[in-house]
Amino acid sequence: MLLNKYFKIMKKLLYLFLALGLSSVSFGQNTLIPDPNFEQALIDLGYDSPPINGSVPTANINNLTSLNVNSKNISDLTGIEDFLALEILDCSQNQLTSLDITTNNFLTRLFCRSNQLTSLDVSNNPLLEDLYCASNQLTSVDVSNNPMLQGFVCNSNQLTSVDVSNNPMLQGFNCNSNQLTSLDVSNNPALQYLWCYTNQLTSLDIRNGANISMKGFFAFDNPNLTCIYVDNAEYSTQNWTEIDPNSTFVENEAECALDVADNSLDVDLILYPSPTDNYLFIQGTTSHLSTTVYNMLGKQVLYVQNTDKIDVSGLSDGVYIIKISDGVNETQRKFIKN
């Protein structure tokens, strides 16, 4: 609640500051609109009159707060710079290769998905709350100057990294289908939805202190992601299932080190059932083996030999790590005891 009040006050102050700056701007009579499809869209919306002549009266557009030119076959949005009062801009599904919104300081919502953008500068848009820039050719997006960002959809680009540490209000974050190798959302306590599947993640940290409030988590199709850092590994294991078989939830780096398996022992080994009340069964390996069970603090709680039926009925409910060895090779898995 305090965080929301703080940002509401901050937003009002930013509006006041930007409005004072806007009042000092002197306008020309016409704004150049070189793209005929953009001008036609403005004519269709009633902000310009035919015929197409490459310009629009500045007085017709400088006080507009919302503009939707979605799917108008526009390749050049030059002229948008004079839409100084614009709060909402939808220019999705066009043919834009660039987009200059550096003077649109009042923007709160920007939709520019399904274009051909290779770069996007939102550093001069401090009021931005929603940014939808999916399905472009972006290699980077800097949102460090957007502290009020709540919805960020940047999937299906060419991003190799993305930093959302300065976005504490972020609630929905979709970055799937990029080239991300690491992702840290531990500074996003308001996060409710995270889509980060189909990347190249090897490190994912979502220890934001509010995992229990999240409503959606999707991290599958990251074949090299072994450890996912969370607030509570047992809760995440039981509630978040959209992960790869080789991914496991851990609470700290020590658990991750313990959890990384040397899968040289029978890659087809099956451990079942999980969760279990009484027994674990090992299928797909030799019966001449040793089995060690550890709790999530790394403490050994059970050790047996030469059996593929493990009695875990005496263990407390929770998440455990089981190490299976044939004396030469070994593998580690996780299971849940009910």
Image: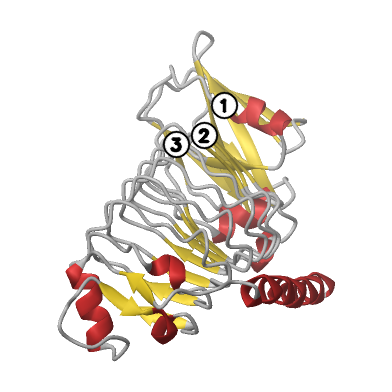
Mark earlier in primary sequence (1, 2): 2
Count of numbered circles in the view:
3
Give whichever of 319, 142 is nearer the camera: 142
Q: How many C-alpha atoms fall within 10 Å of the one at disc 1: few (<14), some, or many (≥20)?
A: some
* Residue 5 circle label: none
Q: Is residue 205 visible?
A: yes
Please name the amino acid that badge 1 sits on: Val
* Residue 160 circle label: 3
Give whichever of 149, 20 is nearer the camera: 20
| Residues under numbered marks 1 and 2 in contact, where contact means CB atoms less than 8 Å apart | yes
**What residue do we see at 49% from left, 31% from top?**
308
Q: CA distance from mark 2 to mark 3?
A: 19 Å
Position of 323 with respect to 83 (left or right) is right
Q: Residue 186's spot in the image, x, y percent?
A: 68, 49
Position of 327 with respect to 140 (left or right) is right
Give whichever of 135, 194 is nearer the camera: 135
The quarter of the picture where the N terminus appears is bottom right
Q: Is residue 71 visible?
A: no
Mark earlier in primary sequence (2, 3): 3
Mark 2 or mark 3, which is nearer to you?
Answer: 3
Position of 197 with respect to 292 (left or right) is left
For label 2, the residue is 226
* Residue 260 circle label: 1
Q: Is residue 83 above or below residue 182?
A: below
Please name the amino acid that badge 3 sits on: Thr
**What residue do we see at 20% from left, 79% from top?**
40
